[in-house]
Image: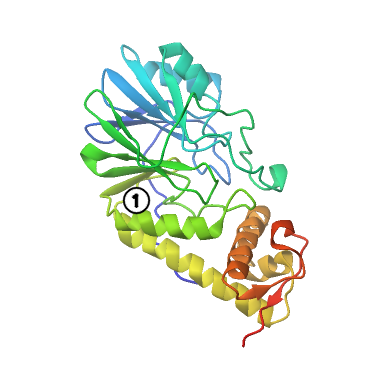
Amino acid sequence: MTSIPFVREFDFEYGRCDTLSPLIRRVIAPNPGPFTFTGTGVYIIGHGSVAVIDPGPVDPAHIAAIDTALEGETVSHVFVTHHHLDHSPLAHPLAEKHGARVYGFGPPQIAPAGGEVRLEAGDDVGFQPDVQIEDEEIFPGAGWTLQALHTPGHTSNHVCYALIEENTLFSGDHVMGWSTSVISPPDGHMGDYLFQLARMRDRDFTRLWPTHGPAVESPSPFIQAYIDHRLAREDQILACLADGHETIRDMVAVMYADVDKRLHPAAAHSALAHVIHLIELGKVASDTALDQIDLNATFRLAETV
């Protein structure tokens, strides 16, 4: 497999507000786990009249930490990258406290399959932004400017936010320094994900701030490694099919043999996303209709002419 230069070490304390740059501060929520790493990083943009990105979970200690960090300031915008329970639940309570509105791409297009076995954080099924943003829409603030980039893949409604003044991207779960992102059909789509990775790479940002974990300091080569890793995973799937492994679970057992088995259910969904992408490319076939494919389907290499 292609190696990704993951970054996992960084200095933080729960409840502490850290200044990361002239315009960026961060408070990390105390919700660590296999899919949240050290917890949700909540970003505060600007000073005085500020924006908040991914407020995180509704947790008393976390709410107190956010309130302390924002003391004497007003939130003008609350932005959400997507609808998972580690990102969006505190959005509306925080916005209401400050008389602000919540901005996001809207609810997911399709309910993801797999339920809680798929993601520890799960889906914030009631999430609905006050304002549905458009791709590349610009949001000016008090000394800061954010541009929304609709980046479907991890979820259909995933959005990253570019801070124009610092050529920095808040990448949500689209790209993370500590791990790859789960792509879970039918709402998640691998073809969309790969396309958006290339789009993000080509913007040549100076730095990425994911919602979980430390910054990515050299985004373009890091994202290319992400892409190479995904393409190598598809080569692995083709090899598994050539060796007679017909199901997603059989392929995951081979491909992720050295990975914590708690992560295998999530890996199965990403593998399924890869297989669907390979079917769309004409490299894999199944007797199950494309819109009916799930973890129980069987697959084979497509016949070549």
Quadrant in the picture for residue 251: bottom right
**Colour style of the rendered protein structure:** rainbow
Residue 12 shows in this picture: yes
Residue highlighted by disc 1:
216
In the image, residue 44 lies at what x, y percent?
A: 35, 28
Element under label 1?
Answer: loop
Of residues 74 and 5, the one nearer the viewer is: 74
Q: Residue at x 51, y 34 (%)?
A: 87
Give the answer, above or below, for where 6 lies relative to 284.
above
Q: Position of residue 68 (x, y in %)?
A: 38, 16
State the residue lying farthest toward the bottom. Answer: 305
Give the image location of residue 77, x and y in percent. Answer: 38, 23
Would you place residue 24 above or below residue 64 in this image?
below
Instruction: Identify the amino acid type marked 1.
Output: Val
Task: Mark 1: give few (<14), some (14-19) or many (20+) Cα within 10 Å.
Answer: many
For the point 23% across and 40% down, the residue is 166
Where 31 sits versus 113, above or below? above
